[in-house]
Amino acid sequence: MSNTKALPLLEPAGQGTVPCCPPLAERPMTAEEAETAARMFKALGDPVRLRLFSSVASHEGGEACVCDISDVGVSQPTVSHHLKKLKEAGLLTSERRGTWVYYRVQPSVLAAMGRLLTPAPGA
């Protein structure tokens, strides 16, 4: 069991969704918002994890079988470890189908990440 807390990038709010954090240029982050964003960036701070995340996000249909994305220059157990870290951070979801696990990035995760890094108006 992991003591890592999943990243709540989006919270339900009425008809839309509310990102975890405001754009960096909008206002100073609260301590809680900074902790949430730091977990996301920490998970993406490893080159192998970033490559795996990119492979899943750019894969046709927005999901990828682990068998299709494991060629990142490390062993299969290491790939599994990094995918687990991305899941724990709330950046990926997975579904087992037979003997294979399929990973996907929810569009809302990419939208929240993009909003966080949106420049201030007029910048």
Image (cartoon, rainbow, N blue to C red):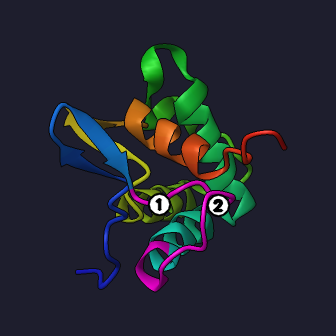
Q: What element carries label 1?
A: loop
Residue where numbered disc 1 is placed: 21
Q: Does the magenta stretch include residue 21?
A: yes
Is 83 displayed left or right of 45 in the figure? left
Name the residue located 48 percent from the left edge and 33 percent from the top edge.
67
Q: What stretch is highlighted in magenta?
A: 20-33
Which class describes the residues within 10 Å of circle 2: few (<14), some (14-19), or many (20+)? some
Q: Is mark 2 on a helix, strand or loop?
A: loop
Image quarter where the C terminus lies is top right
Which class describes the residues within 10 Å of circle 1: few (<14), some (14-19), or many (20+)? many
Residue where numbered disc 2 is placed: 24
Counting from the top left corner in percent of width and height, residue 111 is at: 49, 36
Q: Which amino acid does label 2 sit on?
A: Leu
Q: Work out how far the residue at label 1 is from the one at label 2, CA to CA, in angstroms.
A: 8 Å
Name the residue located 30 percent from the left edge and 85 percent from the top edge.
3
The correct choice, above or below, for 27 with respect to 102 in the image is below
Q: Does the magenta stretch include residue 24?
A: yes
Residue sitting farthest toward the front? 122
Is 23 displayed left or right of 88 in the figure? right
